[in-house]
Image (spheres, helix red, strand yellow):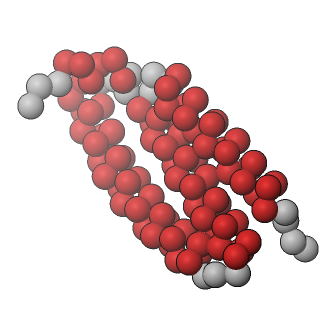
Amino acid sequence: MNVPFQHALALAAALFAIGLTGVLMRRNIVFVLMSVEIMLNAAGLAFVAAGARWGQPDGQVMFLFILTMAAAEVSVGLALVLQFYHRFKTLATDAAGKMRG
């Protein structure tokens, strides 16, 4: 079964829009990180769809790089969330304004 290229790109655009909305609207750091993951998966889907469209494995290779970057982002992001909660006792993004460095 072959999914049309336009449908795959439309799904990737919809997922990216959902993720962007989540980043801009949410006040919880965990939800913001989940929204960033949705955006990364949307970019990966677009790469895979483009690679399948032109018959090249480049899209799948880029998706592997995106998965690696997403795994690193999750590990660093969750470590920052734990430290943020330990310091401020909240996960609200508004509390980040109190940070100094």
Residue 1 vs residue 101, the one in the foreground: 1
Residue at point 17%, 24% (across, down): 99
Residue at point 47%, 35% (across, down): 32
Residue at point 45%, 27% (across, down): 28
Residue 4, visible in the rendered structure:
yes
Instruction: Tell me if residue 19 comes above or below residue 69 in the rendering.
Output: above
Residue 89 vs residue 71, the one in the foreground: 71
In this rendering, position of residue 71 left or right of residue 60: left
In this rendering, position of residue 51 left or right of residue 88: right
Residue 15 coordinates in the image, percent (x, y)? 66, 44
Residue 36 vs residue 89, the one in the foreground: 36
Residue 71, visible in the rendered structure:
no
Residue 98 coordinates in the image, percent (x, y)? 19, 18
In this rendering, position of residue 18 left or right of residue 95: right
Residue 22: image quadrant is top right
* Residue found at the very far front of the displayed protein: 54
Query: For the C terminus, which image quadrant?
Result: top left
Instruction: Tell me if residue 3 comes above or below residue 87 in the rendering.
Output: below
Residue 59 coordinates in the image, percent (x, y)? 59, 72
Query: For the N terminus, which image quadrant?
Result: bottom right
Instruction: Tell me if residue 57 comes above or below residue 20 in the rendering.
Output: below
